[in-house]
Amino acid sequence: MTAKIMIVDPTGWNLAVSSMAKNDVRYALNGIVMFTDGSVGATNGHVASVANNVVVYENLIETIIDYELIGEHGGAKAGVIVSPQKVLPKKCVYAVIEIDRKMIIPYDQESKPLTPILYEQIDAIFPDLSTYFSEKEEPRERITFNPGLLTRLVSNLGKEEGARFEFYGPDHFFRMKYKTMDAESIVMPMRDQ
């Protein structure tokens, strides 16, 4: 029987893909780690993301995972690290990772297969993401911002440019000052529902 992993949350999967490194000398960072509890995570050393309830394992996942090779996150053992060539397409509602063929097959709403995505499996030790996502410390502020607005602002920056974010409290704007240009932006928080 072929071992398969089903991606049931393409958005969570793509979040991890967008957080993984590209061509990093720390080889494990060039992929997504899948945990035994169904969560996935990735980091490029500057950004780290973990999404829960993203994958479902079929047909004895233990046969394809070396639990001793990789660490843990939130009590769940980390299983396998894969490096997909790209994110899942927007039309994807679920996908199947075919271990034997080393490909991810996305499916649309009508369960029709879309263009397969190749991946490599990475044999390495993934960093312990629980050090980043510890909930022992309470946040000082909780502020909700529209990601579309932030994306538009940072898309104007070059890869090596930076911006400084100045926060003025949970009910106030934040100011974004650009490192290489004499400009700044103000972003208002979203109103909590």
Image (cartoon, rainbow, N blue to C red):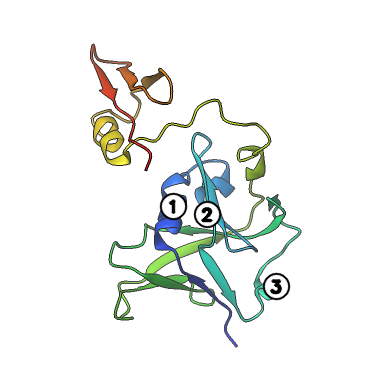
Cα separation, mark 2 vs mark 1, equals 7 Å
In the rendering, at what x and y percent does residue 137 appear? 65, 31
Please give the name of the residue rendered at 43% of the width and 21% of the height, measured from the top-left corner: 169
Tell me the quarter of the image containing the N terminus. Answer: bottom right
Helix, strand or loop at disc 1? helix
Above/below status of 76 relative to 156 = below
Q: Is residue 128 left or right of residue 143?
A: right
Which mark is first along the chain, 3 or 2?
2
- Which element type, helix, strand or loop, lies under badge 2? strand
Residue that mark 1 sits on: 17
Vertical side of 170 occupied by 104: above or below: below
| Mark 2 closeness class: few <14, some 14–19, many ≥20 residues within 10 Å | many
Local SS, label 3 = helix
Q: Are marks 2 and 1 in contact (CB under 8 Å)?
A: yes
Q: Mark 2 and mark 3: span between their CA atoms?
A: 18 Å
Place residue 127 in its image quadrant. Answer: top right
Check disc 3 and give the amino acid type: Glu
Is disc 3 surrounded by few (<14), some (14 to 19) or many (20+) residues within 10 Å?
few
Residue bearing mark 3: 62
How much space separates mark 1 and mark 3, taking CA atoms?
A: 24 Å
Residue flagged by tag 2: what amino acid is it? Ile
Position of 165 with respect to 102 (left or right) is: left
The foreground one among 155 and 174 is: 174
Residue at the outermost front position: 193
Mark sitting earlier along the chain (2/1): 1
Q: Which numbered circle lies on residue 143?
A: none
Residue 42 visible, this angle: yes
Residue located at (27% from left, 28% from top): 157
Q: Which residue is mark 2?
A: 32
